[in-house]
Amino acid sequence: MIPAPRLMILAVAGLLLAAMPVVYLPQLWVAVVVLWTVLAVGCLVDGLVLWHARPTLAVDAPAHVGVGADVTVPVTLETRARPALHAILRPEVAAPLHAPDDRKLRTRRGAVTVEAPLRAPRRGGGILRAVWSQLDGPLRLLRRIDRHAVDAPIAVVPNAERVRQLALAHFGHQPHGGVYVTKRRGDGGELDSLEGYEPGMDLRQVDWKSSARHQQLQVRRFRIEQNQRLILCTDTGRLMADPIGGTERLDHAIHAMLLLSRVALKNGDLVGVQAYGAKPQAWIPPGGGMRQLARVKHGLASLTARPEETNHVLGFHRLVGHLRRRSLVVVFTEFGDATTAELMVDYLGQLARRHLVVFVALDDPAIEAPLDALPREATDLAAATVAAGLRADRQRVLRRLSRMGVDVISGPPGPATLSLLERYVHIKRRGLIG
């Protein structure tokens, strides 16, 4: 037990009062004795109550949380003290978890449950080491502080829930995120069936030979091809560690890849993953089914952005060695300027000759903000000038990629993910993978 701030203030006041009889009024000795007697009795009361309280804690910690999400952990505080006490709970966590606020509450005899907030700004293996409890006595003269060991591991894993909710809001509550995988007409798709012509149908799909045989107009219906290959390729270099909205750029890319993987696997396609930095980091061969989704989740969860320059030449060379047939390749990467992006652009152009390549560039709102704001100081004008130069270099590289046949998606993380899903749906409907 330790003295509370109220006791310290009263003790200082008592010392000042004790000095007054020596200088001014000797009769104040009685008041000094009474004050210190009251403080002693109050401390005794608080001490007995806090000693009898014997607080215990029970924590229901989750096994994993999503990166970038705020999570609440139920904490049950139980005391034996009859009077209500002021209490404060403070979680003790290990990185990458963060406990932003303490929880204040009033106890009663028995158990009280509160929600302790935790924040997970990046992926990794976090630990809820302990929860500290602070109890003030009924007179708030003494304070009891206890450390309750928990040692509960909490894994911070990729979090696709926020992006998935955006996708559901965009596509509507349709199965497979708005992708119908059977009996959908697609250019160059597999013939599914013939059906009678009805007004409004496309006359270009009329099968004239079958129409002559049946003496009725027959329209060809196509099924979108399945078992096509989708390769998700992500950069894990130092630029992918830059935060966007408090979450690493790599984590935003992982969220988009998880969502696209789920849609593609439910669509019957094969999904693979390639990750590279200074050297290739991970390769998950293309596969189908929900077991492949578990493998993709596990592989993406182990990726980390490393403080090293990305070797695009080695990464794309290794990727080409894995691809035996035409595939849809989705590339998540970042570049600092047009000069450093030269090799990346050249290899993406070569890759686009044999495969369908989608390049995803996530914009940072912090860079776009100075361009939209009205400059008020010289520093604001300088920031806007630098941001304009960065955006011009970026747009120059993206335009060059588009001219080389690469499908470019650029925007903030949320809208870019929705655009990527729309592009996948469009590609499947048109049968562009081949």
Image: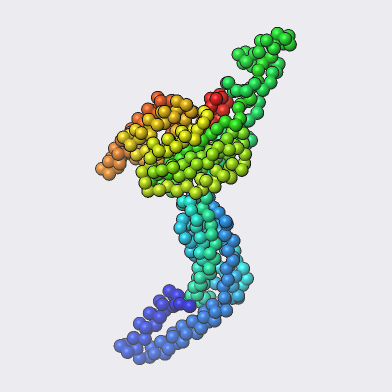
Quarter occupied by the C terminus? top right
Residue 426 placement, left or right of 366? right
**Viewer-closest of 81 and 57:** 57
**Viewer-closest of 86 and 420:** 420
Looking at the image, the residue that sits furthest to the right is: 214
Residue 346 placement, left or right of 105? left
Q: Residue sitting at 60 percent across and 31 percent down?
A: 227
Residue 412 visible (yes or no): no
Question: Where is residue 58 drawn, in percent x and y?
Answer: 59, 66
Q: Residue sitting at 40 percent across and 76 percent down?
A: 9
Looking at the image, the residue that sits furthest to the left is: 378
Reply above or below: 149 against 69: below
Q: Residue sitting at 57 percent across and 26 percent down?
A: 429
Quadrant location of residue 60?
bottom right
Please count the marks in the image: 0
Question: Where is residue 337 drawn, in percent x and y?
Answer: 33, 37
Q: Residue sitting at 66 percent across and 16 percent down?
A: 219
Residue 296 visible (yes or no): yes
